[in-house]
């Protein structure tokens, strides 16, 4: 499995690490990849797509690297299982709801509701990330 993410402050990167831990604890292999190192064909041979991006600005995806990457894979997600996650510092998770709708409109099968964490994922939020990874691995 591969997790592609963008992180500005490190919060979403830590979520990716914890989700990856949950996947490996379930006996599966996982690779974490910064979106700056990801190409549009990264998920071509993958059954499950795992994506992470924090809320930016007025609750949107990061616009210089992550949103263009999403645009590049939109035609490739049809009938694939997709899991989304990200951190935020304000708002109510609108960016995640919009992102879920966007991926669904491209034919993606969302595995579960997107995981959002306010700030740094520690304590119960950290455990939630690990469980999220375990659920993806099932």
Image (cartoon, helix red, strand yellow):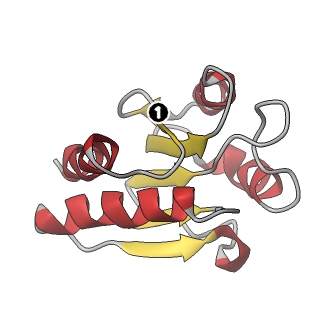
Q: Which residue lies furthest to the right in this view?
A: 64
Q: Which of 73 and 2 is in front in this view?
A: 2
Q: Which residue is drawn at 48% across and 52% down?
A: 120
Give 77 or 28, whichever is nearer the viewer. Answer: 28
Q: Is 120 rendered above or below residue 34?
A: above
What residue sits 19% from the left and 51% below the top? Answer: 134
Name the outermost residue toward the front.
123
How far across and down, in percent of the image, does residue 111 sit? 36, 34
Please count the marks in the image: 1
Label 1 secondary element: loop
Q: In this view, does 87 lie to the left or right of 83?
A: right
Q: Quadrant of residue 115?
A: top left
Left or right of 55, for residue 14 = left
Q: Position of residue 23 (x, y in %)?
A: 23, 61
Q: Where is residue 80 in the image (x, y as percent from the top left)?
A: 45, 43
**93 or 38, which is in the foreground?**
93
Identify which residue is drawn at 57% across, 70% down: 42
The answer to whether residue 16 is visible is yes
- Which picture quadrant has residue 14? bottom left
Against 104, residue 78 (above or below) is: below
Picture quarter with the N terminus? bottom left
In percent of width and height, residue 47 lies at 37, 54
Q: Residue 14, relative to residue 71: is it above or below?
A: below
Residue under the image location 78 percent in, 36 percent down: 60
Q: Is residue 80 visible?
A: no
Q: Mark 1 points at which residue?
A: 114
């Amino acid at each position: 499995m591969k997790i592609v993410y963008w992180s500005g402050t490190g919060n979403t990167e830590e979520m990716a690490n914890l989700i990856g831990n949950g996947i490996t604890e379930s006996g599966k292999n996982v690779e974490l990849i910064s979106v700056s190192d990801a190409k549009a064909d990264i998920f071509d041979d993958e059954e499950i797509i795992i994506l992470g991006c924090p809320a930016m600005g007025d609750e949107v995806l990061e616009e210089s690297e992550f949103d263009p990457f999403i645009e590049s894979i939109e035609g490739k997600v049809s009938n694939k299982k997709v899991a989304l996650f990200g951190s935020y510092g304000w708002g109510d998770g609108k960016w995640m709801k919009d992102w879920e709708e966007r991926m669904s409109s491209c034919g993606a099968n969302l595995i579960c509701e997107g995981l959002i964490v306010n700030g740094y994922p520690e304590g119960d939020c950290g455990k939630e990330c690990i469980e999220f990874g375990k659920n993806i691995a099932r």
